[in-house]
Each structure stands twice: as structure tokens, then as C-alpha cells.
Image (cartoon, helix red, strand yellow):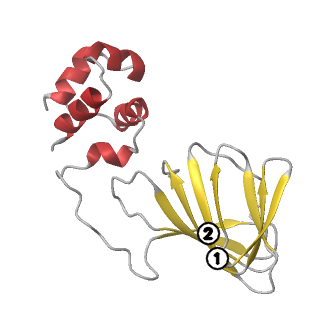
Amino acid sequence: MNLGQTIRFYRKEKGLTLDQLAQISKLSAPQLSKLENGKSNPSMESLRRLAEAFDVPLSALTLTEERTLLNPVRAGEGFLMRWRGKGDSSVQVRYLTQGRNAKMQPIIVAIPKGVDTGKSRSHPGDEFFYVLHGRIRFFYGEEEVFEMNEGDFLYYESHIPHHWENIGAEDAQVLTCNTPPVI
């Protein structure tokens, strides 16, 4: 599918007319018609508004294939990012989806011993949390705290603020998966 066909597909999937989509996205109906018919190219801001209106990641609109080809992420691959935690070391985050039209976002998080991921944060959707290695203290909301060991699993609503702390004697690693993707 080309971009126009993709926009039309999502509009119809949501059961929206052009006028309804125009109202939700703050784009004009004529502009949307031109986009759907391939007579205009959208700005990045227009794409962002459409993705929000359809409740899909931005990448879902730019995918041009009928079917996404599988793209295995090999050991050590993925988009690597670091963020500072409370402690001497950085927490390392490896995003395992690479430009796919993903409805969920698997992440491997490496937390050095003695490091806390910092202030509790929240984001839309659901998340699961699986301890691959080590011991983690999981903070959820203002009152719930869980001590998690290798092989332990949680599934939770991620709009509740949460964070983690490595309480083990060695570096820890967790696998999380967010839906919808947060980046």
C-alpha cells in the first residue's frame, strides 16, 4: 500500500468520514482527500496528527508493503540507549523492534548492581516485566513493592507510575514489553 491507501485504510478501519477525521486530526477534509488520493505529500506534523487520530505509531503510516517482512533482531542488535539511574552507572536499554509496524515494543533493560532506574514514570498502555537475570525491587504506584527474582513475571497497567531497583549482588537484566510502543 502507498501512503494514501494506508491513510484511507486506517480511516475506514476506524469508521470515520473525511470530515470526522478532519475534526479529530485538525487537518482539513480537502487536505485529507488529497493525501488519500496521492495528490499531496504530508508534513511530519500532519503524519503525527494522523497517527494520533488513528492511535497507531507513526511508522504504521509510512509502511508501504502489504505485509511486513520478518526482520529478526540478532543477539546484541537493536536500538541501544542509556539513561542515568540513581547510582554510579547508567541503565542500558535495548529496543528490539527496528522500524516495524509494531503494536508492542519489546525492550531488554540492563541495570547495574545497586542502581535504581530513578523517579517513577508512567506511559499509556500495558506492559509486562520478566526478570531474565538478577534480583529486582519493583515499585508500582505509591504503595506496592515487589521483590522479583530470575524467572518472575508481572503484567501491569503502565499508566500507573513505576520504576525498578537492582537489589542483587550482580548486574540484572529484565525483558519488558510495552503496548503501544512508547517511542
Under mark 1, the amino acid is Gly
Q: Position of residue 141 (x, y in %)?
A: 79, 47
Camera sees residue 49: yes
Q: Position of residue 120 (x, y in %)?
A: 76, 52
* In this picture, residue 132 sits left or right of residue 119: left
- The image shows residue 165, relative to residue 20, as above or below, that is below
Residue found at x 35% / y 59% = 99
Residue found at x 18% / y 29% = 36
Q: Position of residue 22 (x, y in %)?
A: 34, 17
Q: Say which quarter of the image contains residue 13.
A: top left
Q: Secondary structure at mark 1?
A: loop
- The image shows residue 48, relative to residue 128, as above or below, that is above
Quarter of the image with the N terminus is top left
Q: Residue 130 — which label? A: 2
Q: Residue 137 — which label? A: none
Q: Secondary structure at mark 2?
A: strand
Q: Mark 1 and 2 residues: CB-CB less than 8 Å, in contact?
A: yes
Q: Say which quarter of the image contains residue 58.
A: top left
